[in-house]
Amino acid sequence: MVEEVSTIRFLIRAKVSAEAGNRMVKDPNGLKILEDYISKIKAEAAYFYEEDGDRTFLFIADMASADMIPVFAEPLFQGLNAKVEFHPAMTLDDVKRGIQKAK
């Protein structure tokens, strides 16, 4: 019998101050470090935008368990001094299945 591994999709938002963002941009390896992070967490998508005057990164990634939160968060905390948030997220199919279970 094969055990099904369930994952939860998370929206991970990292807000980086102008100072920390400037250091990353000036670092010759800054964007490579960001690319490596995206690969490491196997992000389904990555978006970059401004929020409240700060550089903000938004990643969509799956996590198998809560003990993965430090794996996803620490590089952002330590490497970019980012403020990090995790939000569970659903696809439309997830919503449909959930609504059926809620009835």
Image (spheres, rainbow, N blue to C red):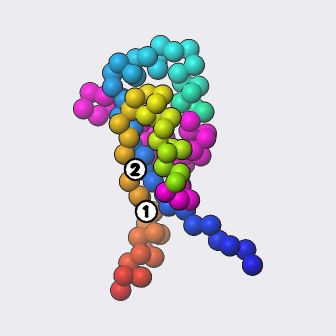
Residue 18 location, quadrant: top left
The residue that disc 2 covers is: 86
Q: Is residue 38 above or below residue 95?
A: above
Specify the amino acid type for callout 1: Met
Label 2 sits on a secondary structure element that is: strand
Look at the image and tell me whether residue 56 can be seen: no
Residue closest to the far bottom = 103
Residue 88 point in image, percent of width and height = 41, 58
Residue 90, which numbered label? 1
- The residue located at (36%, 29%) in the rendering is 16
- The residue located at (75%, 78%) in the rendering is 1
Q: Is residue 21 above or below residue 61?
A: above
In the rendered image, which quarter contains the C terminus?
bottom left
The region drawn magenta spans: 37-66
Q: Is residue 91 magenta?
A: no
- The residue located at (55%, 62%) in the rendering is 7
Relative to 66, is 83 on the left or the right?
Answer: left
Residue 31 point in image, percent of width and height = 54, 24
Q: CA distance from mark 1 to mark 2?
A: 13 Å
Specify the amino acid type for callout 2: Phe
Nearest to the observer: residue 92 or residue 55: 55
Label 1 sits on a secondary structure element that is: loop
Residue closest to the far left = 52
